[in-house]
Image (tube, rainbow, N blue to C red):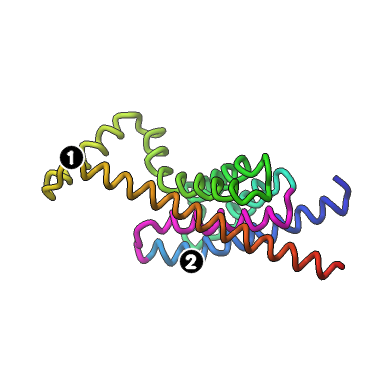
Amino acid sequence: MSQRGAARFWAYCAAFGALWGALEVTVGSLLHTLHLPLSGFALATLGSGLLVAQRQLLPERGATLATGLVAALAKSVSPAGIILGPMVGIAVEALLVELALLPAPRSRALAVVAVTLAASWALSQRLLMTVALYGEEVVSLYLAGLRDAAAFLGLPEEARWVALGALLALVLGAGVLGGSAGHAVGRRAAARLAEARA
């Protein structure tokens, strides 16, 4: 990579990373303060859609991961201080998007896959990190709690499969919406830049 190419690479990574980090610090802090459900999921969808848009402008390998690391560092200046969980979450989301877009950075289909993976991680991060810290017994406790809740509410056994189907539909819907929107916004921005240069 030439010196000019490296400067362009880091300028895009810094700009998009700072934007993502600012969204996490402001909007994220507000959503978490309000204790709104699925706030991390919504932020992951928004952030990964932003990464997809960036790759339409800068299809270089490693750009998404570098942007995620900038965003994670920006998150460390949150009023809540350095929170390891969200910072790890941001970095892993960026890694998943990076891996998904490696074969074809400007593919709309892979953009949908990328956002779906990031949104899935946002939903499962807490459980996976809890299992890593406390062992597999935590999964049994979660399942027992779900069974008890279903019994308390008088829901049939099939209700958990309905709930699982609804959760999968939510994740896929976020992937389609976030991936398609990020791809469209990025392609439009790339076209405008090309016109301006011409």
* Residue 190, position as x, y percentages in the image: 73, 62
Please report whichever mark, 1 or 2, sits nearer to the chain's N-terminal start: 2
Q: Which residue is drawn at 50% across and 58% down?
A: 177
Mark 2, Cα crowd under 10 Å, few <14 / some 14-19 / many 20+, is some
Helix, strand or loop at mark 1: loop
Residue linked to disc 2? 27
Residue 33 figure quarter: bottom left
Query: Bounds of the magenta span?
Result: 34-59
Q: Which of 109 and 143 is in front in this view?
A: 109
Q: Main secondary structure of the magenta part?
A: helix
Q: Whole-Å distance between the Cαs marked 1 and 2?
A: 38 Å
Give the vertical position of 1 relative to 28 (above or below): above
Residue 60 horizontal side relative to residue 2, left or right? left
Residue 34 figure quarter: bottom left
Question: In the rendered view of the protein, which quadrant contains the C terminus?
Answer: bottom right
Q: Residue 157 carries which label?
A: 1
* Residue 97, position as x, y percentages in the image: 59, 46
Residue 140 horizontal side relative to residue 98, left or right? left
Helix, strand or loop at mark 2: helix
Q: Nearer the viewer, residue 108 or 10?
A: 108
* Residue 154, position as x, y percentages in the image: 11, 48
Q: Which amino acid does label 1 sit on?
A: Glu
Mark 1, Cα crowd under 10 Å, few <14 / some 14-19 / many 20+, is few
* Front label number (1 vs 2): 1
Q: Is residue 43 magenta?
A: yes
Q: Which amino acid does label 2 sit on?
A: Val
* Residue 86, position as x, y percentages in the image: 49, 51
Give the vertical position of 7 relative to 131 (above or below): below
